[in-house]
Image (cartoon, rainbow, N blue to C red):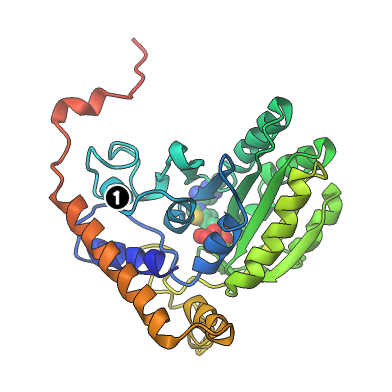
Amino acid sequence: MHEIRFFEDTVKDWFSRALVRGSTHLYQGQEAVAVGVTAALGPGDTTTCTYRGHGTVLAQGAPLDRAFGEILGKAEGLCAGKGGSMHLTDLGVGALGSFAIVGAHLPISAGAAWAAQVQGTGAVSASFFGDGAVNIGTFHESLNLAGVWKLPVVFVIENNLYGEYSPVSTTTANTDLAGRGASYGMPGVRVDGNDVLAVREAARTAVRRARDGQGPTLLEAMTYRQSGHSRSDPGAYRPAGELESWLARDPLLVAERSARELGVSQEALDQVRERAEAEVAEAAARAQAWKDPEPDARFDHVWMAR
Ligand SMILES: Cc1ncc(C[n+]2csc(CCOP(=O)(O)OP(=O)(O)O)c2C)c(N)n1
Ligand SMILES: [Mg+2]
């Protein structure tokens, strides 16, 4: 979680200094969701996520330097520098992709789960998406098919209370999003998305269910993005005091509190944070030192109709 936080702080700094063009969607505040769910996954399991996906892909195990390299457009980046911030992908660790089209990846996770079911691999697929995706057609189609075919998939709503600048209640008539699981014959579970141990526990139950052939689960993780929607959004639409109340429940603070209660010393916790900070700084420096791709490389991996 510290690695993701330092990674995102670095990305925010790069974009605000115009070292990277375009936009980025940061994950500070939501780290416990990616880390808690992926902690319940094992080798061979897969994930898909959104354009707010740096945290998920890193939690799956993608290397810090190649993720930075991708954002910087370097040839050593995870996608040879051609995907950028919104499209981090690392098939080697089972991160099947980050998708900028809201809801586009739910059918892909259902498909990965179907492949696992047909091939009998025992693999589970987890799909991370925002509260904004629950009113997209693919949400209904994917959950329904997964329910009917009992696919080994965990659908994870990262409910951060906003879709772009709109509070959930202004776009969704029934804000009990977990409750929608009932419509598709699967359990719907709401969990504190800022408590990594609670998320891991809920995810373990869902993953076990999926692996046992009992089918999918809909998890709704209640969380908050501490930055605006994207680079250019200062988040001025948020009511006074809202950010502060969520910062008081920052997932890193919650995790440290849990660790202390379990007997971990403050010194050990400080070491974890310091090591993460140093690893992220080294990876960032390594990625910045990589050369830009050769101009001719722009035609590699591109399919052109003639
Ligand atoms: C199909 C589609 N419609 C609209 C958009 C524009 N858009 C980009 S992000 C976003 C908000 C999505 O909010 P949510 O799903 O809650 O995810 P969050 O950004 O909060 O993580 C919208 C509407 C899009 N990318 N794709
Ligand atoms: Mg949202």
| Residue 44 higher or lower than 232, as above or below | above
Image location of residue 198, percent across then percent down: 66, 71
Q: Residue furthest top?
A: 306
Q: Residue at x 15, y 45 (%)?
A: 290
Task: Kindly identify the residue that appears in the image at 56 percent across and 55 percent down.
Answer: 38
What's the residue at 36%, 57% (across, down)?
24
Residue 61: x %, y % from top left: 44, 50
Nearest the eye: 35 or 233: 35
Q: Quadrant of residue 231?
A: bottom left
Q: Residues within 10 Å of mark 1 (few under 14, many from 20)?
A: many
Q: Can you say which quadrant of the picture contains the N terminus?
A: bottom left
Give x and y (percent) for residue 94: 51, 41
Question: On the image, which quarter does residue 10 sit in?
Answer: bottom left
Write down the residue under mark 1: 71
Q: Nearer the viewer, residue 55 or 278?
A: 278
Q: Is residue 221 left or right of residue 147?
A: left
